[in-house]
Amino acid sequence: MWIALALLSAAGSAATAFSLKRAMSWGGPIASTILLRASAGVILLTAVLILGPAPVDSPAYLRAVAIALPFELIGTLGWAMALRSGELSLVQPLFGLLPVVVTLSGAVVFGERPTPAALAGVALVAAGIYTLGVNRARGPLAPFKALASHPAGRWAGLSVLAWSVTSVVHKLGIAAVGPMSWGVTLAFGSAFGFLLLIPFLPESLRVVAIQVPGARRHWSRWAALGGGLFALQQVGLQFALREAPVSYVIPLTSTSLVFAVLVGAAFLGERAALRQRLGAATLVATGAALVALYG
């Protein structure tokens, strides 16, 4: 069951990234992220109130929130800025680095020992990211240098490092209040956190909607749609994490990379280097499948 939930999360993740990128074509990254996360929080909270049980504060829950939210804010900001700086089909495959970091973190924090097949899957993920950076540059480190020189690559790297922490802490939050309530915490907590940060951000990041007719309407629709898709992604992710180790779930959700490349080509006209990006994303997805099935 957890595999189906992880795949649901993967599809939701790719669709959320697409919606956020469209929202940011009409408005600012911070305002778009706040509306997206707040919309998701409303949906998830409604589900919690209907289905129950209501969350109960506890020291374990408060500790998980205190650890997770700062890193969730950093990771979400890096993700939004990466999407604004680069094409969807370039940015999403970069997040294939997340399973590598999470697998290592899960082994250290939770003692989750991956099998040789799972380690082979992690190697395929790394190979996919390496392939993504290959162009005409030469030398074994050239692909990584090429990615590091791109703003989207740097923002994505920051996001991966931050989200590797929250991915591990998810287990603690779920154990304290359950998967749905933990999803509500992440959605509303990040939206409120960005609201508090707005006065300290550069003017260029405070934009709500661009000044053209109809921009605010298009912006709000895409951001709200992204919120619904993010809520779906959270349901799949948090319930999958309740049933399976984090070092298995996160790699399988990386199949969203293939979805993102195809969505970028079909709906955003991102056809340059499509074969290379699809090949890289496929390597990542294959590695994720190895981790999920044989981990």
Image: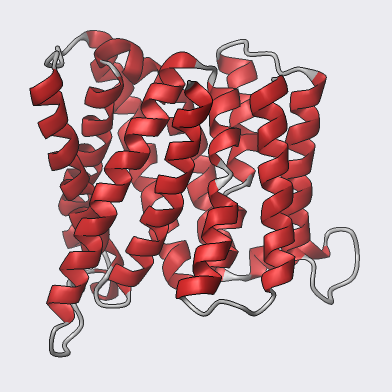
x and y, in percent, of residue 102 in the image: 58, 31
> In which quadrant of the rendered view does residue 93 lie?
bottom right
Instruction: Using the rendered image of the protein, determine whether residue 287 is visible from the camera's viewpoint.
Output: yes
x and y, in percent, of residue 238 in the image: 37, 27
Q: Is residue 211 above or below residue 41?
A: below
Residue at 53% over, 23% down: 246
Residue at 59% over, 24% down: 247
Q: Left or right: where does residue 279 sit relative to residue 140?
A: left
Q: Left or right: where does residue 33 sit relative to residue 243?
A: left
Residue at 53% over, 42% down: 161
Describe the colour scheme in one phrase.
Answer: secondary structure
Judged from this view, the residue extending furthest toward the bottom is 212
x and y, in percent, of residue 236 in the image: 39, 32
Q: Is residue 219 above or below residue 200?
A: below
Total numbered circles: 0
The one of 206 and 34 positioned closer to us in this rendering: 34
x and y, in percent, of residue 96 in the image: 62, 47
Quarter of the image for the C terminus: give it.
Answer: top right
Residue at 17% over, 49% down: 39
Q: Is residue 22 above or below residue 75?
A: below
Q: Left or right: where does residue 224 sit relative to residue 69?
A: left
Instruction: Using the rendered image of the protein, determine whether residue 144 is visible from the camera's viewpoint.
Output: no
Q: Is residue 219 above or below residue 226?
A: below
> In which quadrant of the rendered view does residue 148 lie?
bottom right
Q: Left or right: where does residue 243 sit relative to residue 272?
A: left
Judged from this view, the residue extending furthest toward the right is 139
